[in-house]
Image (spheres, rainbow, N blue to C red):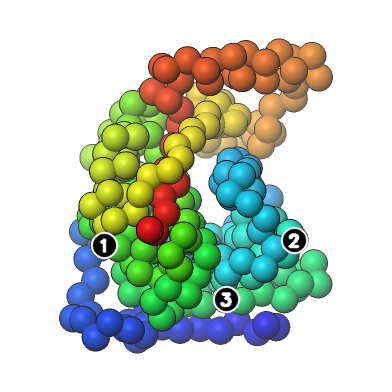
Amino acid sequence: MDRLTAVPADRALDRRGEEKTVVRATQHSRQVWERFWDQEKPIEEVYANSPRIVEQIEKLGPVAGKWILEVGAGSGRDGFLLAEQGGRVIFLDYAINSLTLIQTIAQRNGRSVALVRGDAFRLPFKEACLDLVYHQGLLEHFTAPQKILMENRRVLKVGGHAIADVPQRYHPYTLVKHILIAMNRWFAGWETEFSRSQLERLFRKVDLDPVGFYGDWMRPSFGYRAMRELLKKISVRLPLYPASSPLGAKLRLKAAEWFRRSRWAHYTYMDIGVIGTRR
């Protein structure tokens, strides 16, 4: 597909014939993300995703030939990696600037992409048509995350997988975020977070069986990112990623691998994810 296929969210196809009521976070708006993904902001200044979602998807089996939907696609970085492996990736977002950015990146690299402007609460797909649905940094922006997961399940084939990747509750980031929300200074408006048990309960409520859990730390650290943002206000610009020696990087990797085996590790993760399957 060489051109952007825009399906307005307010006219998203309703395959079930149910009342078309969308429940959103009370302080959240599409304009927040239109501004965030405005192409005036260089994509090089936006931190790349950790490869954790792609790694989890690869563990589920070969990607080639699978119909994969990324909900709230953002810059589409994960989707591009999956498409390189032969996945039939559909990028869905309700922000036009997000889809335009994905299209620009695809054209720059000589790729074709399937883009849909749609609503996470009313996915414009028929029932049981996709092999995998995933999203990163989506559920926490809405007051009714269960309804989004219900839609994930609806469009999945039996045996298909859904992955939800969200901020972890027990982290300093959570405290700072809520202080900024109270001050009306948080870039994304209203936002929440989840514990592992809470996220797994949400999956079970919509008949998605949790079959996997993972977590990861912020890289670079939350402290470094916060300092970088503060220094930018006085025109001091730190690099996006701090310099690191090969030996230091190797030691950190070894320490992280050791700590992951601890039962306390998931309380320190910045982001967590649950993988569920439709039986």
**Which element type, helix, strand or loop, lies under badge 3?**
strand
* Residue 220 in which image quadrant: top right
- Would you say 108 lies left or right of 212 here? right
Instruction: Give the secondary structure at mark 1.
Output: helix
- First in residue order: circle 1 vs circle 3: 3
User: To which residue does mark 1 refer?
Assistant: 147
Say what amino acid the circle numbered 3 marks: Leu
Identity of the residue drawn at 33% across and 59% down: 149
Q: Going 75% across and 61% down the picture, which residue do you hit?
A: 84
Question: Which quadrant does the C terminus fall into?
Answer: bottom left
Which of labels 1 and 3 is toward the front?
1
Secondary structure beneath dot 2 equals helix
Is residue 162 shown to the viewer in this render? Answer: yes
How many other residues sit within 10 Å of disc 2, few (<14), some (14-19) or many (≥20)? Answer: few
From mark 3 to mark 2, how far is it between C-alphas?
Answer: 16 Å
Please tell me which residue is depicted at 67% across the width and 68% down the height of the picture: 65
Between the C-alphas of marks 2 and 1, the distance is: 31 Å
Task: Using the image, determine if residue 20 lies above or below residue 63.
Answer: below
Q: Quadrant of residue 42?
A: bottom right
Q: Amino acid at mark 2?
A: Glu
Image location of residue 43, percent across then percent down: 65, 55
| Disc marking residue 115 | 3
